[in-house]
Amino acid sequence: MKTLFSALLVALLTGTAAAQMKVGVIASSTGPTAFVGIPQKNTVPLLPTRIGDVAVEYIYYDDASDATQTVQFVKRFLTEHKVDAFIGPTGSPNAMAVLPFIAESGTPMLAPVGTPAVVLPMDEQKRWVFKTTQNDGLIGDALVAHMKKNGVRTLGFIGYNDPYGESWLKEITAQAKAAGLGLVAVERYQRTDQSVSGQAIKLVAAKPDAILVAGTGGPAVLPHTTLVDLGYKGKIYQTHGAATPDFVRLGGKKLEGAFMAASAMVVLDQVSDSVPSKKVAQAYIAAYEKLHGTKPATFGANVFDAGLLLQKAVPEAMKKARPGTPEFRAALRDALESVRELVGTQGVYNMSAQDHSGFDQRGRVMMTLKDGAWQLLPD
């Protein structure tokens, strides 16, 4: 007993005692965004509990899809739990709401959200945020290229009336203009709307060759099926926010022929073994299915990738400081920004001072919905 005590005392005095790191996780496992937040919450048990000499504790809160609660939980994490990093939150509006608190505290946040506005344009607040989903520009580029290749000349748009929809409208407006496509109609809707008939009627009246729906999961179904019910015969495109089993299940046959750009994880059995992310995605899916008895949506994979990024960055940060200090959090931020060629479930991460998402074309493929399942389209 005396020998053990002496060893512990020496370890403490020399700074070699095992380090403890706390990570705050916020996801919307209830409320309107639960279809995204549930697979994220379910992925937390798969995150690494030890990284080198560092024991990692994950503390989870459900913000019920409410940005006000997200802010309250972030404050609690900072004052009560004194976390070294955040994973989350689920929603784009929620993530935007906490940016000032993240930056003021100097705590890195790994955000599994859609809008690139959490990292672009880069500034003193956003330099503390790292995004584990593809930026809209990368997905939009694939969508617009497919449109041009298939004779689309005019485009309609309907998206959320929030940061996710706003980001997509900004992105598709710029990309359509650069590609010579005319944006002839723009409509917005709320995530909780039960009807978008008025917006859909206006879109159909504008007679665009194609319409882009900027929604996520189940709520992305409503505009799509409403357009089909109104007899719209043009092409309908979805963003990677629709890459969920619920989207396909809720929309049924009315979604046949939909187009989407998203990570290869959605059509993993159809992509070549040479795709870098395939093995990592397969391992994640197998582990999730073993634990929960069902396959995960890509939204859960975004949280899993946050764990991979921490595994890469924490050992580097430990060379400069120990967890629980401002110096460690700053070193962790710097280490995350220096990540190169890290293969995740969604693609390959190459972070930089100006790019805190880090995905390239290896992080997306084009697909279409056929016979109730997504089918990979050729390049």
Image (spheres, grey):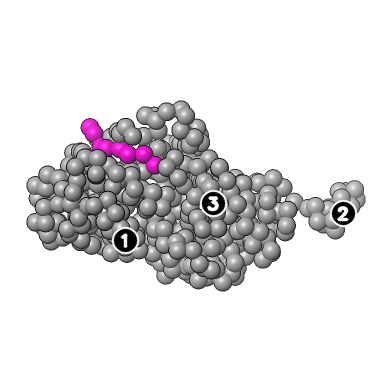
Please say whether residue 38 is visible from this viewpoint. Answer: no
Q: Tell me what residue is drawn at x 34 percent, y 48 percent.
A: 141
**For the residue marked with disc 1, what is the amino acid?**
Lys
Mark closer to the chain start, 2 or 1: 2
Q: Which residues are magenta?
A: 364-371
Q: Is residue 249 left or right of residue 138?
A: left
For label 3, the SS is loop
Q: Looking at the rendering, in which quadrant would you find the C terminus?
A: top left
The CA distance from mark 3 to mark 1 is 23 Å
Please say whether residue 10 is visible from this viewpoint. Answer: yes
**For the residue marked with disc 3, what is the amino acid?**
Met
Residue under label 1: 170
Q: Answer whether labels 2 and 1 touch (C-beta < 8 Å).
A: no
Q: Which mark is residue 81?
A: none
Q: Answer whether labels 3 and 1 touch (C-beta < 8 Å).
A: no
| Residue 327 image offset from top left, x and y in percent | 69, 63
For label 1, the SS is helix
Crowding around mark 3 (Cα neighbors within 10 Å: few <14, some 14 to 19, many 20+) is many
Pick whichever, 316 or 40, lies toward us: 316
Check residue 352 for magenta coloring: no
Q: Tell me what residue is drawn at x 49 percent, y 50 percent.
A: 358
Residue under label 2: 10
Q: Is residue 330 left or right of residue 290?
A: right
Mark closer to the chain start, 3 or 1: 1
Q: Is residue 191 left or right of residue 292?
A: left
**For the residue marked with disc 2, what is the amino acid?**
Val
Q: Tell me which secondary structure the magenta stretch mostly adopts.
A: strand
Residue under label 3: 351
